[in-house]
Amino acid sequence: MTATTTFHRSPGKPVRVLFAERISFDHKERSDSIERQDKRLTDRASEERAAGWDIKVVGAAEDRSVSGDVDMFDRDALGKWLTEEGLTQWDELWVTNQDRLSRDDTHVMAFVFKCLQWGKSIVILDDPSFTEKMQTVEGRVIIHAQSIGPAKELERIKQRTKESFEARLYTIAWTAGIPSYGYISEIRLIEISPGKWKERSVKVVDPHCKAMLHWMRNRLVEDPTESLEGLCQKMEAAEELTVRDRWRERKKRCQCKNEHHEVRKCPKRERWRSSNLKVILTNDALRGVKKKDGKVLHWPDGSEVLVAEPIFNKYEWETLQTAIKEREVKTVRVKTEKTEPTPLLGVSHCYGCKKSATRGTAWSRDGKTSYRYYRCMNRPRCPAVSIPAELAEAVIEETFLFQKGKDYVPRKEWQPGSDNTEELEELRKKMKRLQEDRDAGLYDSETRKQEFQERMRGYLDTEERLAAQPQQKAGWKLIPTGELYETAWDEGDQEKRRHLLMDAGIKLWVKQKIKGVPQYEIQVPSAAKYVNGEYDDRFADEGSHVIEEEREFQEFLGSVEPLSEEEQHELLGLVAAEG
């Protein structure tokens, strides 16, 4: 029979025991699995009861798939018992061996001192004298010496893991972790060296996720009103799982660790967020390349390391990235019952800080009259930068229709770059990486210096040859349609009109007031700016055309009915109070 622990125990008084169980990988076939640990601890409790002790097992802290270098306080299961409330529920912590407690010697010693401070005991089945040793200086020295062995083993495990990772880095083997959305990992037989084959985990396309990614891409590319937030709402409505939850579903392990929960019904199921979705859709891994530390890996010749079938081809990938970049500027506000659409969202900007200008509403003192206005949305706001919404929306509409009304609304058509352009861009990336390697000291030796010079000379010669050829950069090409802007404006709702303004590049710059009078500029691409309703050719963009109908333009700007002096005075006071 195992020696009985008697420290801090009183005969006839119940001993509240907490089992601490840990395993690095949740695999039942391992020799020291959670089930095996639990059986040993339960058998020990029976032996203690047979010896006359009133053992009350208050619980078992099961930490599955938890590395030995994770601090006890940071573990999901054990950490709950180490809180102020949890500490009141147990007297002794039992563990099968010191390795299950921790493989980090600093964590072991820190936990020993904490238990002494709390008046708790640690019982290790494979070291019956551990409880007594932790009470004396000499004993604690021995405990520290004993913990060095597991710590050294942990270092060796980390080193082996690192070497294994490095060895697989430039193979199609999937090194570790959860693959990016669109892929899953499967065990396949691969050739790791000439004539040598081994089973390794590799990335393969998940057909369902691939279909969802293409659906999201098509929405973003084809529908200018679609947003990342809107896609997230649709994914939530369809109960689509995130990449981590899909991994948990395959492992039959929900996030709350309740075996009776389905991952889709788990209350802790992850939600789709626009920021996370943007990371997914801009991840180069969707092109089938391999990455390390967030950067795409390259072979010595500069080509990318491919490890899986691409989700998107070059055209699909480039158009998707362009659509996402456009939405970094053109944010579509989701309409709710509490918020009204803003006609000039993405069109109005603060002239001082260049941030967007947002619409605000102020109310008269009697609460009967509201005043809408656009103001700087920066924090802190630029002082006195505001303009009545009625004035802003009127001058934008009149300017837009005057400048662009007779033009045709264009449709976007993707223009692929010439082979020469793509080859030139890839070559310059190789040159940049080669220079970075030299700056990092990888070409310091004489032999390596000569190698660097030869490779760089070859790159420069190729660049000169390619640069002399006709070039066409990939991008969107605007093709005129048969619809006039003025027709689209008359037939469109408020949201469509807002997108017409943004697609045409119209911008309203709200400036600081002068003696309480709103100041503004309206920018029209390939035309001039209008400063407070007056044409100023100093601001004319390259390729702008002279407006011969300036007199007529001034007339319809003058037709905008201004606020009365009393209304202006009250609005200025309310805006000032808003800050």
Image: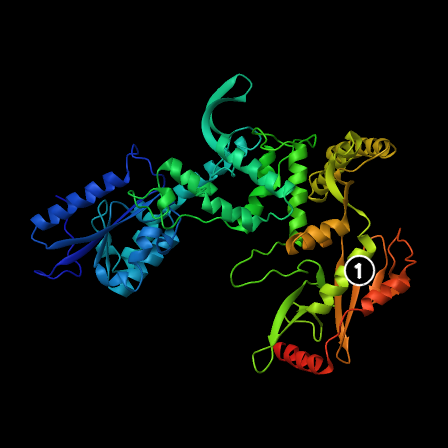
Whether residue 206 appears in this view of the structure is no
Which of the 4 image quadrants contains residue 371? bottom right
Which of the 4 image quadrants contains residue 339? bottom right
Q: In this view, does 174 lie to the left or right of 434?
A: left
> Where 467 sits versus 493, above or below?
above
Depth check: give the residue in front, 529 or 494.
Answer: 494
User: How many other residues sit within 10 Å of disc 1, few (<14), some (14-19) or many (≥20)?
Assistant: many
Depth check: give the residue in front, 522 or 539.
Answer: 522
Whether residue 501 appears in this view of the structure is yes
Q: Looking at the picture, how far across and down is residue 123, in whole percent? A: 22, 52
Q: Is residue 236 left or right of residue 78?
A: right
Q: Looking at the picture, how far across and down is residue 486, in whole percent? A: 76, 52
**Dot 1: what SS?**
helix
Q: Mark 1 points at which residue?
A: 399
Amino acid under label 1? Thr
Depth check: give the residue in front, 222 or 240.
Answer: 222
| Quadrant, the C terminus | bottom right
Q: Is residue 346 left or right of residue 56?
A: right
Q: Is residue 246 left or right of residue 30?
A: right
> Where 310 sits versus 381, above or below?
above
